[in-house]
Image (cartoon, rainbow, N blue to C red):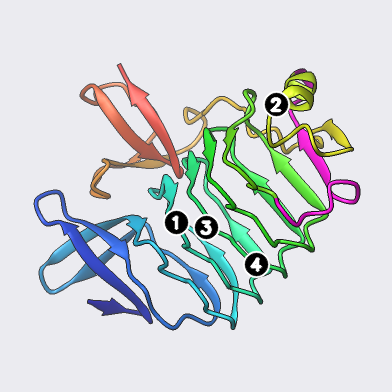
Amino acid sequence: FNQDGITYEIVDPADMVVHVCEGKYTGDIVLPTIVSNQNGTYVVAGMMPGAFANCTSLKSVTLSDFIEIIPENAFSGCTSLETVNLKTVVREIQAKAFYGCKSLVSLSLPANMLNIGTSAFSGCSQLTKITCKAVIPPTCGENAFFGINKYLCTLYVPSESIQSYKEADGWKAFSAIKPVEEGESGIHSVTVADKYFDVYNLKGQKVRSQIMTTDGLPKGIYIINGNKVIVK
C-alpha cells in the first residue's frame, strides 16, 4: 500500500511489520516509525533491496527508528543524495547500499554499527568527512570505501579507538583519523526520569503515556525517545 508518497509491503502480518518498497522518490524523504491503513497500524522496520535505487532526484533521507539494516543497493545510483540521517539502531549497511552517491559530502555512522558491506560507499567521491561512533571498528567488505579520496576525507572516531581504526582493514587507508568532535560521540546514558515520556513496544504500539519512570513495566525491550531501552 502507499501512504504519503511512500510504498510499503507487509512482510509480517502477525507482528504488523512493513518494509519500504521500490518507488520513484524525489526531494526530501522522512520514513515514519509507524504507518497505518484500513487494516491497522504497522511498524516501518526495514527496506526492500534497491528500495531507493536510481532515484536521481532524491536529496535527503531520514530513516525510521526501527530500521537496523540498510539492504543491498538501497540507495545505489542516487546521484543527488546529499544527506542521510541514520538512526542509532542501524547496525549493518549491506553491499552497494550507497554505491555511486556522489553528492554525499559527510556521513555519520552510529555507535551500534557492526558491518559495512562490499562496495557499500564505493563511488561516493565527494565525501570529505566520515564520523564513525562505534568503539570497535565495524567490519568492512572489499572496496567498501572505493573511490573516496582517503587523503582529503577525514575520519572521526572515538578517541580511545583511534589506534584500532589505524590497524583495521577498510579503515586504515584513511590518512587523517581524528577523535570524534565534541558532542558527536553517540555514547550516552538514557536519562528519562527528569521529564515525561511515552513508551512504545517493538510493534510501534504505545504502552504507556506521559510517565516519568520505567518502574512497573514488564521485562522487555521498549522504544523511549527514539532509543531502545531494556527493562530487566
Residue under the image location 68 percent in, 68 percent down: 82
**Quadrant containing the N terminus in the rendered view:** bottom left
The part of the chain drawn in magenta is 146-160
The span from disc 1 to disc 3 (Cα, nearest Å) is 5 Å
Q: Are marks 1 and 3 in contact (CB under 8 Å)?
A: yes
Instruction: Give the amino acid at mark 2.
Output: Ala
How many neighbours does mark 4 have within 10 angstroms: few (below 14), some (14-19), or many (20 or more)?
many
Amino acid type at circle 4 is Cys
Q: Is residue 121 left or right of residue 93?
A: right
Q: CA distance from mark 3 to mark 2?
A: 21 Å
Is label 1 in contact with label 4 (beta carbons under 8 Å)? no
- Gap in angstroms between the C-alphas marked 1 and 4: 14 Å
Q: Which residue is mark 3?
A: 97
**Secondary structure state at the residue bearing disc 3:** loop
Q: Position of residue 153 (x, y in %)?
A: 84, 49
Q: Which residue is mark 1?
A: 72
Q: In this view, which residue lies farthest toward the front? A: 142
The three-letter amino acid code for the residue at tag 1 is: Glu
